[in-house]
Image (spheres, helix red, strand yellow):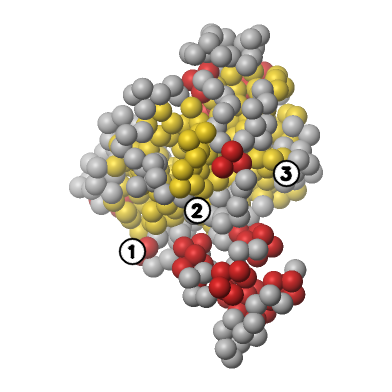
Amino acid sequence: MAEAVTAAAAALLPGFPDEIVVWEILVRLPPKSLLRCRAVCRDWRRTTSTRAFLLAHHGRQPSLPVVCGFEKAGGYNKSILAFDHRASADAQLRPVARLDNDWFFCLQASCDGLLILSASTSTWRPCLAVCNPATRQRALLRQPRDASLFSLLGMYLHRPSGEYRLLLYRTSSRASIDGEDPLPERRIGCYVFFALGSDQPPRYIGGPEAAWALCLDTPALVRDSLHWSPVQHQGEGRLVIVFDTTAESFRQMRAPLVPTKSHIFELDGKLGIYSYDDAMKVVDVWVLLNYEGEVWEHKYRVELPAAEIRGQFGGREGRLDVSVVSAGDVVLLLLSCGQWLFYVDVDGVLVDSFRRDGQKLYACGLGLKQTLVPHAFFTALEDYTVNTSPFI
C-alpha cells in the first residue's frame, strides 16, 4: 500500500524519505491540518487523496468524547464539541460544528466520523440528516420519511455489504404525517434501514421485549455489535441487550451486579459499565475482561469532588449529570451542570472546568473519530450541501 502511494510522489519533502513523510508525518495530522497541507503542491494533494491513505489517516485519528451545547430554553443542539484531554487547557474543548439557528437539531448517533442528526424547521416535517464535520458535508436521508414515528437506536457499518445502516424503533402505529408510509402494517418494533442513500423500505426485525428501553440510552459499539445498558428482565436479573451488526439479530449477555441504574460505554475495544449513587458522590466502573465468558471486573470506585465542583459556581446546589467516557485506554469522567462542564480523573481529582455562556453542556456518550474518506451516498441524497447549513 505504502509503495503504491509513494511511487507517485517524488521528493515530497527534501531531506526526508517519502515513506516517512507520508506514513509517519502526514498520516498523523488532524483533518484540518491535512487539508491545508494539500495546498502545498500537487504531489502532496495527490498523495494524501488516495483511498488507501485516507483510510490509514482515519485509523490514526483519536476517538474523542462528544459534548453537546444546548439552548437553555428549547433543548435543541446549537453546537457540537469534542473533548481532547491531551490538548492544552485552552484547547481541550474544541468546536466541531456550530449549528444554524433556523434549524432544530438533536445529535442522535455517530459512526466512523459520520453524525446522524434529527432535524426540523418550523415548516418541515421531522427528518434525519447525515453529516461529516471534517468535510462539512450534509444531506437529508430519504428514509424514514416521517422521523417522528421512530427513535434511532444506533448507526453501524454492515461489513458484508459495506453499507452504513440505521437501527430504529417504531414507537407509534399511527399513520405517517404525509401519508407516504412505507410500512402500511405499522408494526411497533425494531427496523433496519438500509444504505444511507437507499430508497429501499426498511426491514422489520422485531426485537426483544424490552426494545423500547433501548431508546433511552446510547449504545456502545464493541466487536461489531451494539450494546445497551443493562435492563431488568423478569426472573433473569439485569441483562445487556446486544445487536450483532453482521447478522443483524439480537441476543443478551450477563451484566455485573449493579445496585443502581447503570450506563454503558466503550473502553479501548472493551465494554465498560458505570453507575452512581443518588447523592452523586461515588461512581463505580466495571470492565468486561472476558467477552466470551462474560466476566466483569470492578475497575474503579471514584469519589466525586462534589463540594469543589459546586464551589466553582458559588456553592449553589444543582444536579450533576455524570458521563464516564474513554479516550483510547484512558477513562475520563465528564460532569455537567448547566453551562459548566467538569473534567475529573479516576482518582477523583478535578482536573479542569469549562463554561459556555448561553448554552447548557452535556457529554452525550458518543465518540467522534473524524474522517476525510469520501462517501458516494452524500451526492445521491436530497438537499446535499457543503459548507452551508447546518454548519455556520
**Can residue 63 be spotted in the picture?**
no
Identify the residue under disc 1. Answer: 90
Graded by Cα atoms within 10 Å as few (under 14), some (14 to 19) or many (20 or more), the crowding at tag 2 reads some
**Disc 1 vs disc 2: which is toward the camera?**
2
- 58 to the left or right of 121: right
Name the spot of residue 389 as percent of width and height, x first: 39, 41
As helix, strand or loop, the secondary structure at mark 3 comes to loop
Identify the residue under disc 3. Answer: 162
The numbered mark, 1 or 3, whose residue comes first in the sequence reads 1
Graded by Cα atoms within 10 Å as few (under 14), some (14 to 19) or many (20 or more), the crowding at tag 1 reads few
In the displayed structure, 351 sits above or below 111; it is: below
- 146 to the left or right of 223: left
Tag 3: amino acid: Gly
Q: Assess whether mark 3 and mark 1 are in contact (beta carbons under 8 angstroms).
A: no
Tag 1: amino acid: Asp
Q: Nearer the viewer, residue 203 or 365?
A: 203
As helix, strand or loop, the secondary structure at mark 1 comes to helix
At x 61%, y 69%, the residue is 46
The numbered mark, 3 or 2, whose residue comes first in the sequence reads 2
Distance from the alpha carbon under mark 3 to that under mark 2 = 20 Å
**Can residue 135 be spotted in the picture?**
yes
In the displayed structure, 143 sits above or below 226; it is: above
At x 65%, y 32%, the residue is 198
Res 135 label:
2
- 271 to the left or right of 311: right
Distance from the alpha carbon under mark 1 to that under mark 2 = 24 Å
In the displayed structure, 24 sits above or below 261; it is: below
Name the spot of residue 245 as percent of width and height, x first: 72, 37
As helix, strand or loop, the secondary structure at mark 2 comes to loop
At x 67%, y 52%, the residue is 269
